[in-house]
Image (cartoon, grey):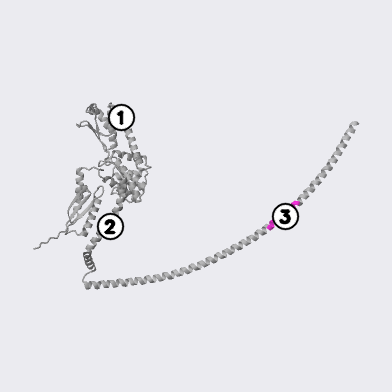
Amino acid sequence: MELIIVVAAVVAGGGAGYVAKSTQVKRTLGHAEEKVKKRLQEAEEESKNIVLEAKEEATRLAEEGKKEEKQRRQELVDTEKRLTKREETLDKKLDDLDKRSEKVRQEEDEIEKFKQELTELRQKSQENLEKIAEMSKDEAADRLMKMTEKDMREDLTKLTEKLKNDAKEAAEDDARTALLSAMERLASDVSVEKTVSSVDLPNDEMKGRIIGKDGRNIQVIERVTGVDVLVDDTPGVVVLSSFDPIRRQVARRALEILMEDGRIHPGRIEEVVQKAQKEIDKEVMQAGADAARETGVVGLPKEVQRMVGELKFRTSYGQNVLKHSTEMTHLAGMIAEEVGANVRVSKYAALIHDMGKSLTHKMEGKHHHISGEMARKYGVDEAIAHAAEAHHDDVEATTPEAMVVRVVDAISAARPGARSQSVENFMQRMQDLENVATGFSGVEKAYAISAGREIRVFVQPEDVDDLSAYRLARDVADKIESTLQYPGTVKVNVIRETRSIEYAK
């Protein structure tokens, strides 16, 4: 019974709690519903405001768009008016041009008609003159030319002489200034080093040691160096013969080392030749680098530097080619600066202009052609390659730098003591100069003097007058330039003498 009472109490308490909780929930829901309604009202009012603002903004944008469209339409109308006005102006100008063209055509027709009338009148006049003079047009012109030439010969001779002297003085003054300025600033030795092809021996016993038993030593030397070793009766000398100056220099150095060491046998010879080869290679590269540094030429490719260095062991008419090239480079820089040519191109080309001589025993062709070919092969600028290649007459010099190189080559070769010539070559050169002059008609005698620097041409006065003498001097000079090779310049002196003899009785 007590249990029932307890359960009933619990049930009654739970029911009361449920009722109280239910009442609280209803109250909370009521408050929430009121808040939701309030928020909904606020949202409706806010959305209405947004819609109104959007409508106002749309209205404003529409009005602005209408204004802009109206403005653009007005601009289009103005542009169309301007274009229409321009079109009318162009049409008017075209009409004017058409009228002028028509007028020009009419005037051309009138001019052509007038020319035809003049031609007819000229022909009629010429026919009338020919009838009156009883000579054709060509005959009259020829007679007139002869009369004019006869009357003006003396004046023409004086005028020609004056113009020639004026031009010569002006040209010589400019050239003399540039050349003397360059030559005065360069002082180089007249004597030059020559490449030797013989080796001095300390004694005659050394000849036998070089030859070796059954000639084994000399055979090994010739095989590994590619040089012919000539041992004759001349005391204390062994002669080395080879077209390759580098090989000859290697053989010379190897013999010097062998004689200093004293051990001369086939194994030692091969070892010493290799050592000499390395020394000469190093000396060649150093010579090329020294020449470039001395002359201020930078950027030489390694292969070009080697070919320039090999010129140390080459001579031309007794003149060391490397010394000749460095001397030319200094002169080229000075003269290029004086005349306004490119100094770098002139100096670079002058330094490498003869490098083809280091390859003439290996390649076919003239040395200056080889120089140009090698320069292009190793990436040297075309302006430099052309200037180096054109220092002889068979390649036309088309740039100021090429002319500078050609001039300084002649200066370096022509200065006193620079080159040596054999008596036979000297006599042949003199004879060639005289033969060129005597090949012209009216020449009586010709003499080459001043070591080939001047040729005096004596003419027959009855066959060559004063005006023809000037022309003959120019023709002889032109033929010498085109047919002969010579250093420097050759003065052509034409001499005409007229004597009048009478006897008083």
x, y percentage for residue 258? 28, 29
Tell me, yes or no, whether the two marked residues, 2 and 3, touch with CB atoms within 8 Å.
no
Q: CA distance from mark 2 to mark 3?
A: 105 Å
Could you tell me which secondary element the residue under label 2 belongs to?
A: helix
Residue at numbered disc 2: 166
Relative to 454, 84 lies left or right: right
Residue type at mark 1? Val
x, y percentage for residue 5? 90, 33
Q: Of tags 2 and 1, which is closer to the observer?
A: 2
Q: CA distance from mark 2 to mark 1?
A: 67 Å
Give the magenta part as a residue range: 42-56
**On the image, which quarter does residue 310 sit in?**
top left
Relative to 87, 463 lies left or right: left
**Which circle marks residue 272 in the picture?**
1
Question: Residue at image x 40%, y 70%?
Answer: 104
Asked whether 51 or 161 is in front, the reply is 161
| Residue 304 visible, this angle | no
**Which circle marks residue 49 in the picture?**
3
Residue type at mark 2? Asp
Question: Residue at image x 70%, y 56%?
Answer: 53
* Above or below, 430 relative to 201: below
Asked whether 165 or 336 is in front, the reply is 165
Residue type at mark 3? Asn
Which quadrant of the rendered structure holds the N terminus? top right
x, y percentage for residue 77? 57, 65
Is residue 51 in the magenta section? yes
Q: Of tags 2 and 3, which is closer to the observer?
A: 2
- Going from N to C along the chain, the mark reached first, 1 or 3, is 3
